[in-house]
Image (cartoon, rainbow, N blue to C red):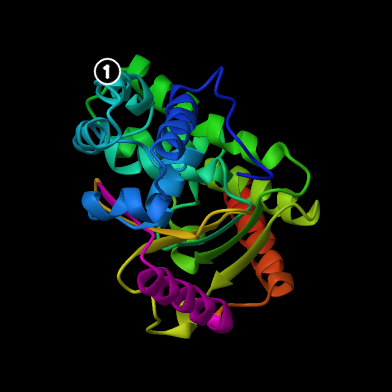
Amino acid sequence: MAGKSLDPSSSPRALLGAELRVARERAGLSQAELGEPLFVSGSFIGQLEAGTRRMHIEFARQIDEILGTNGFFVRNCGAAAKSKYPDHFAAAAEAEALATAIREYAPQLIPGLLQTEAYAREVFRAGHPTATEEVIDELVVNRLARSALLQEPTTPLFWCVLDEAVLRRVGDSKTVLAEALRHIAKLVRQRRIIVQVLPFSAGMHAAMGGAVKMMAFDDAPPLSYVEGLGTGLLFDDPATVAHHTLTYDLLTANAHSPRESLALIESVAEDYEHDRHA
């Protein structure tokens, strides 16, 4: 995949994808022709080859049979499928790392790519109240590692719509939320991200069902991801992705402008900071 590619020498998933491309071309099959007996699209095969999709064991068995690769993909599928993220999010996290543009609606929490350490710790502690500090530490480290994507000066484009509830949901400390909002404002002022706030006054909207994320790539079809409580689904079906894209467009149309949103974020952060000193 142009622009952002995995190094086969350091990524089992990228190596498996590269080997799949070689084996498929050796067999004289197009991506669509290989996908047909697997009941998947040619673009899905392309995503396996590019590393934006993980190869599951069921596909590995069928691919070995179709391409005559003597169990190669079954033997190597396990290593490629390992992830430090939960199963429902692993494929989306892997795709996110290769995306050239990410657009996300966050209804309840600051998106993972924008979270500070203290904010992420509060989120995980709320969701895992009996977990040990070691477990929480590992979760926080893994989440913060994703934010390295934004250390690149321009890619990926990151545009998010925050529901106003995100700005108002205080955890254990107003200081933690104020710091998190200041972090977002800093990234906006550095022109690294685009943020809009969907105010309560917007009323009912197109994404009442929950969070949605769209990811675009240079040389692969776009993906969309929707997430619920402990669940998540990654879509490549063009009609579904188009519907999710329209949903996001409707959200941006009803949200405050980026300039108004920045002013609101900084104002709310200041309010929390004043409450701390009161």
Q: Which one is in front, 110 or 73? A: 73
Quarter of the image that includes the N terminus? top right
* 107 to 192, vertically: above or below: below
Query: Which residue position holds label 1?
Result: 75
**x and y percent of residue 45 in the render?**
39, 47
At label 1, the amino acid type is Arg
**In the image, is residue 146 part of the stretch drawn in magenta?**
no
* 277 to 68, vertically: above or below: below
Q: Is 37 left or right of 189, judged from the image as shown?
A: left
Q: Main secondary structure of the magenta part?
A: helix
Instruction: Identify the secondary structure beneath mark 1.
Output: helix
**x and y percent of residue 3 in the render?**
69, 44
**In the image, is residue 250 part of the stretch drawn in magenta?**
yes
What residue is drawn where x is 66% and y is 50%? Answer: 156
What residue is drawn where x is 57% and y is 43%? Answer: 98
Over which residues does the magenta segment extend? 231-254
Q: Quadrant of residue 134?
A: top left
Q: Which one is in front, 61 or 141? A: 61
Residue most extreme to the top: 134
Residue 108 visible to an observer of this rendering: yes
What count of labels does the image hold? 1
